[in-house]
Image (cartoon, rainbow, N blue to C red):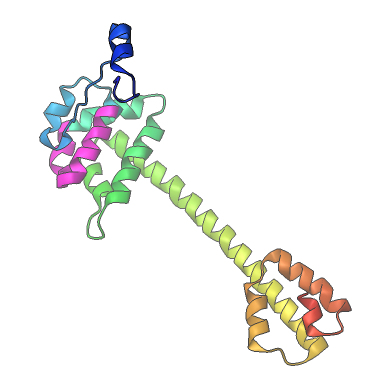
Amino acid sequence: MGEAIMMSEALASSAGSLVPRLRYLLDDLTQLDADGLRARGLPAFATLALWALRSAFDRGFISTAANLSGLFDEVVTADDGGQALASLFGYLFIISRPDEDLVSEVLGHVSPRVREEVMELEEMLAAKKLEQGRAEGRAEGRAQRGAELVMKLLRLKFGAIDPGTEERVRAGSDADLDRWAERVLTASQLQDVFA
């Protein structure tokens, strides 16, 4: 460690045991099976997290999930069990290939209680995404109506509007559209609206 912090040899020798001595340990999870992970004596969630990371390498989720179903039961009963399961199954969802459904496949090897909890989490997530989509749709609709209103005002006041101006209006932010709508009322020329 003395070399890492650029300590002189004299200082390192005088500091003796006060200088930390660290060594690097590489833990190759791909060499462990489900029993090897369980033998480490880690908490259930930590073991399952390592299992998920390890199984991503060889896609061994299905062949090992049944061996770890008891750990899933421990996780679901913990105080933060819902959040822990959301993390685990969220990871499985993210790393699933287009032709895979790892979440469903793993759920086939766990207890009904774990399955029910994960399904509730999926329903809550789907509802949240649906509401998010609706909110985005409403915002897009308001922006589109705002752009249409500004275009209508511009046409009424200045006649035909060139495609470049129309494109600029349709790309404008809500604040831009508000400002332009107000300026149409007092502008004597089209370019005054956008000045």
Q: Is residue 108 above or below residue 169?
A: above
State the quadrant of the N terminus.
top left
Q: Is residue 172 above or below residue 158?
A: above
Q: Position of residue 18 (x, y in %)?
A: 33, 9
Q: Which residues are magenta?
A: 46-67
Drawn side of residue 156 relative to residue 85, left or right: right
State the quadrant of the C terminus.
bottom right
Q: Nearer the viewer, residue 77 or 62?
A: 62
Q: Position of residue 168 (x, y in %)?
A: 65, 77
Q: Position of residue 86 (x, y in %)?
A: 37, 39
Drawn side of residue 1 relative to residue 168, left or right: left
Q: Nearer the viewer, residue 72 or 180?
A: 180
Residue at x-position 29% and y-position 25%: 74
Q: Is residue 84 above or below residue 137?
A: above
Residue at x-position 33% and y-position 12%: 11
Query: What's the magenta bit mostly, secondary-structure-wise?
Result: helix
**Residue 87 within the magenta-colored segment of the rendering:** no
- Regarding residue 19, the answer to whether it shows in the image is no
